[in-house]
Image (cartoon, rainbow, N blue to C red):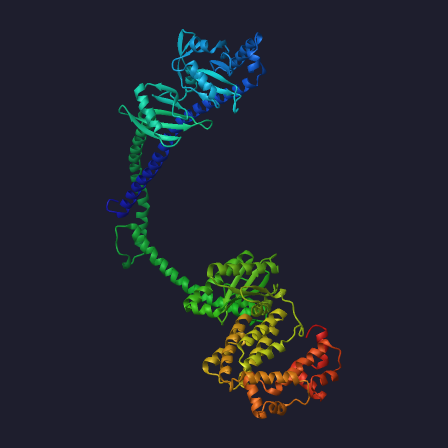
Amino acid sequence: MIRSQRFYHFLFSYILLVVLLLVAVSGVVHRNFFDTLRGEVEESTVASLAQFRDAVDLRMLEMNRLASQLSANPLLTPYAAADGGYGPLQAVAELKQYLSTNLFIEDVVLYYKSSGVPKLYAASGTYDADLFFDSIYRYRDWSKADFLSTAGTLTAPLMRPVEPVTFNRVAEQRYATYMAPIPLNAEMPYGVALFLIREEALAGVARGVLTETDGFLFVMNGRGEVVFRQANGVRERTGERLLEAIRGMPGQSGAGKATADGRDYSLLKLRSDVRDWSYAVALPSDQWMSKVDDTRSIFNTTVAAVFLIGVAVAILFSIRHYRPLHRLAGIVKERHRSESLGDTRDEFDFISRAVGQMAEEKESLLHRLRSQSRALSEQVLGSLIKGKWKTRQEIDDMLQFSNLRLDLPHYAVMLLMIDDYATFRRQNSGHMQELLTYGLIKAVEELSAEAGSGFGVELIDGRSIVFLVNLNEGFDDPDVLRELAEKARAFFKQYFRLTVTIGLGGIYDDIASIPRSYMEASHAARHRFVKGCDQVFAFPDIAPRSAGQYAYPVDRIDQLVKAIKQGDGRQLESAVRGSFGHIVESDVSVEAAECICFDIVNSIMKTLIELEIEVDDRLGETLQQLFVPRCETIEELEHLVIGICLNVCKYVESQKESKNVLLLEAMKAYVDQHYREHSLDLESIAGRFGLSPSYATRFFKNQTGCSLMRHIDSKRMEEAKRLLKTTEMTLREIMTEVGYVDSTNFIRKFKKAEGVTPIQYRNLARNGTA
């Protein structure tokens, strides 16, 4: 034990744990407990001071309320009290009654402003002002004249500080005088109510503030004058210095510190919520926090004792935990003799290396087993989805050799197609693509656990993943499968930054129907081409459409071919967007959409051949992308077509033999005026403009992309279609109107241009399908 490094690791770890726990606990306790204790002492003092403040404020409010009651008493009006005889006696009696209900007030006095001899009505009697201030209540620093001056201008309650007053020329007492105008809050009060308060009454209210410690208590009005003070064990000179420090404190409320006569004091000041008064207390800091200091000494002694006990316990724990480790190291050394483990004085390190070697050997074996099992499962799953096994017995035999457990009653297939696969391959290396694909498979398999189980396999093309979902009883609802697909789609977008299109096949109870569900899922996923990416398509939601439910965009394709031949980029872009937009707006089936798109591409290729444009390697590679299987959506195909055709238009524009725009416009205008004449032909047009027939037709085709006679036929056909739609003219009348003589020739050309006969066209137009 003495030579073992692990034993000392245990010992020092336990000692360190004891130290850390002690430091943490003592730090928290010291910081929180003592701060809390200090705060409680401070809060106790603040609460006492606040209680005193609230009590004084309440007394002031009571005197204001009493003044209001005096002004509302009909027996205490100036007229009733001044009325000779019984009026003054009634006033004195009423004042005695008010005084009897308030122990805080020593005497209450009423004074009414008048032009005669000033009189004061008190609970003790009726007095002239001279008698009252000379004999009854003789103030040392306040005379009758001072009172009358104050009473004449008093509009709000006022309290004089506690001062010495000689009562009945005999005893000197200290009173605080509270003056309130009556009526209270009146602009022009007609009198004043005086409330005489003995200093002992205020001291009784302040009894709870200075109890166990020395100090001072001050009550100051809004001008900083001391209205009331109370001292306990401190000299008056010290109180004056502390009062100056309190007055110098910032703000109306707060705490501070001051030093007076070599002693530290803690200062607390509160402001009244009722009036602009301040209440302050100054307490010696050593007396105020004596309990906190005593408690701190006891705490430090306790921490030292706990540390010594903790060291003893750490030694015992170290011995107890080291012995089993030592025995285990001996067993491992006997049974796992290996030179690579070496010899060490640290038993834990020795055991760790031995276990590490065994774990590496086990992991290597498990890795080989998992790789073979995964490959076999993927092969079995791929064969099962594609229907290579026909009978149930064949399926059961193959499932025995894989870890696929398809023992739940319902089966369905989901096909996930990675959107914008070209960008996916461009932005990720081959290894990263494999990791992301594996992540997608594992994510869906985990999501499938809510309804049953799921197994995924990547298809050969790399852009698609097939999932076989084995559903529990009661989960054979297409909504459950759709919810699973929506969760997977949202999960990939949030965590993999990938969008996928998901096709859902039907749900079946027979395991042999899995290939059918796969075909349905593939068919549903094909709708990405028309509907767009990042969606879920369920096969049961796809309604079958019969052929003939949509109109083939012949006019727009002809406009596209014409724009290419003319080199008109603006018209070309409009024609391309119209052609593909027609497919989306018509809501055709995906098969019909692919056929129409293939025909659009085929028409473009035929036009390039007609224009004798040489296709180089770069253009040929781009043209290969136009075929529908290479494009994920119809929007992608539209962008490719526009880009290629715009380049072709630039080429056609550069190859035009002549730039004579005026001649071309003149020829078009002449055709517009005379195309209804059956005698209009190539020779007459060429003679009109002084050209040879061969040059005229070559010039027109070079500028517009089509021959002159085809242009004339196009104008005549447009007019014939208009007449078929908007008039009731017979076919012969229409044929004569647009410049044709031979009805067979007219019908043949019309059917070649529109795909239907003129009568069929009129019927389709009336039914709203042309």
What residue is drawn where x is 34% and y is 57%?
A: 356
The answer to whether residue 66 is above or below residue 245 is above
Which part of the image, by quadrant, shows the N terminus? top left
Quarter occupied by residue 430: bottom left
What residue is drawn where x is 52% and y is 71%?
A: 636
Which part of the image, by quadrant, shows the C terminus? bottom right
Q: Nearer the viewer, residue 351 or 653?
A: 653
Q: Nearer the viewer, residue 247 or 305?
A: 247
Q: Describe residue 256's horizontal placement relative to residue 505 as left or right.
A: left
Image coords of residue 585 (percent x, y):
62, 69
Q: Describe residue 393's horizontal placement relative to residue 428 as left or right.
A: right
Image coords of residue 132 (percent x, y):
45, 10
Figure label count: 0
The answer to whether residue 598 is above or below residue 158 is below
Image coords of residue 185 (percent x, y):
52, 24
Image coords of residue 725 (percent x, y):
71, 76
The answer to whether residue 70 is above or below residue 10 is above
Residue found at the far front of this picture: 115
Q: Describe residue 350's horizontal placement relative to residue 492 as left or right.
A: left
* Residue 429 in sight here: yes
Q: Nearer the viewer, residue 178 or 458?
A: 178
* Residue 476 in sight here: no
Quarter occupied by residue 393: bottom right
The answer to whether residue 447 is above or below residue 20 is below
